[in-house]
């Protein structure tokens, strides 16, 4: 039986193609489990997992919690807004206190890039990154690739477009690393102000004309404008942004082929994507959420297998 090459899931940049294939293969098995009448396996019965969320989340938090419960792990949920972090306790002290209650694994979402890496060096637990600032969101990229493969098969030489606020997005960076490992062609599209210059060094193509980019792609992954991370003005107005980069049914019908439409959520309906497109047959947004549970079960199971011999 194969093992992951890593002891923590800190980012896609630390994984190799074999790791991705092993995660997808394991997720296939768990997808079958969660579609059974009894959606649970006893694999992690003696493992305790703490979900530490220092930033808001709906999908990722619930999906991790459900994945852990489906694997029969004991689950602790921590939200920074109701904790002693508000009284000035440091991240390392907070986590070490939680770990002293015999916790084996930590899932962490944090606004600061690198927080999961820091923890992996300073505390004695398996760490899973559930999103660190604008850096990485590895389980989102894994579930995105898994969902794409369900629709269009092997991603080698497929054209994948990531649209919108790339510069503030952890989803974009993790997707780029995952897609490149699988041999996909990756292009980003948006106003120049929202596209980081360093992406060209990663071999990612940049297109500012959205209609041209849509004609090129097999999949369009639409990203939200991350207003909470914008300290400046990056485009003239939301109206202008919608006109040039909003995905409408009219735009979708103008291109010569059927493409798959994705969005990691939360959606700003009527800004980066209209309701008509988000709820259309092209959209696999809810499939992404469904696949998230199986992917997170796979990641947790594989790390527990490697680190705790499960
Ligand atoms: N896609 C995603 O990370 O959503 P949440 O912020 O709701 O977890």
Image (spheres, grey):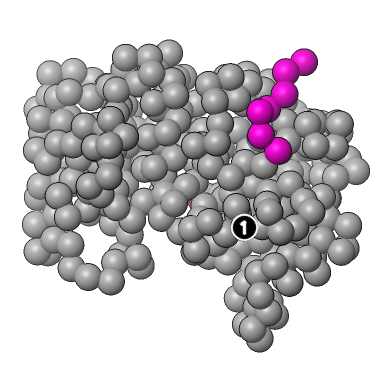
* The N terminus, quarter of image: top right
Q: Position of residue 207 (x, y in %)?
A: 14, 36
The reply to whether the magenta stretch includes residue 217 is: no
Q: Which residue is mark 1?
A: 118
Relative to 85, does residue 183 appear above or below in the rendering? above
The residue under the point 65% across, 69% down is 91
Q: Which residues are magenta?
A: 1-7
Q: How many marks?
A: 1
Relative to 282, does residue 191 appear above or below in the rendering? below
Q: Position of residue 7 (x, y in %)?
A: 70, 38
Q: Position of residue 5 (x, y in %)?
A: 66, 28
Secondary structure, magenta segment, majority class: loop
Q: Quadrant of residue 92?
A: bottom right
Q: Is residue 56 visible to the viewer in this orientation of the structure?
A: no
Q: Is residue 171 visible to the viewer in this orientation of the structure?
A: yes
The residue under the point 88% across, 63% down is 101
Q: Nearer the viewer, residue 259 or 8?
A: 8
The residue under the point 72% across, 31% down is 302
- Left or right relative to 192: residue 51: right
Relative to 77, does residue 153 appear above or below in the rendering? above
Which residue is the extreme one toward the bottom?
A: 87
């Amino acid at each position: 039986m194969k093992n992951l090459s890593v002891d923590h899931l800190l980012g896609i940049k630390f994984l190799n193609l074999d790791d991705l294939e092993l995660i997808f293969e394991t997720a296939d098995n768990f997808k079958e489990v969660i579609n059974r009448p009894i959606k649970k396996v006893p694999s992690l019965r003696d493992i305790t997992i703490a979900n530490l969320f220092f930033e808001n989340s709906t999908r990722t938090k619930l999906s991790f919690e459900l994945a852990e419960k489906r694997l029969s792990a004991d689950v602790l949920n921590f939200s920074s807004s109701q904790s002693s972090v508000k009284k000035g306790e440091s991240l390392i002290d907070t986590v070490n206190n939680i770990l002293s209650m015999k916790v084996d694994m930590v899932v962490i979402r944090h606004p600061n890039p690198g927080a999961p890496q820091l923890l992996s060096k300073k505390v004695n637990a398996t760490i899973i990154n559930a999103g660190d600032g604008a850096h990485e969101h590895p389980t989102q990229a894994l579930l995105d690739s898994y969902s794409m493969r369900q629709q269009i098969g092997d991603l080698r030489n497929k054209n994948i477009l990531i649209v919108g606020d790339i510069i503030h997005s952890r989803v974009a960076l993790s997707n780029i690393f995952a897609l490149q490992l699988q041999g996909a062609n990756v292009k980003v599209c948006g106003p120049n102000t929202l596209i980081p210059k360093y992406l060209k060094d990663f071999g990612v193509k940049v297109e500012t004309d959205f209609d041209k980019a849509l004609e090129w792609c097999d999949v369009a992954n639409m990203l939200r404008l991350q207003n909470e991370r914008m300290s400046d003005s990056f485009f003239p107005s939301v109206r202008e942004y919608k006109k040039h980069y909003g995905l409408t049914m009219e735009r979708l019908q103008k291109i010569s082929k059927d493409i798959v439409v994705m969005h990691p959520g939360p959606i700003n309906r009527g800004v980066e994507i209209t309701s008509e497109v988000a709820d259309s047959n092209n959209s696999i947004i809810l499939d992404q959420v469904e696949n998230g549970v199986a992917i997170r079960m796979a990641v947790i199971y594989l790390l527990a297998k490697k680190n705790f011999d499960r």
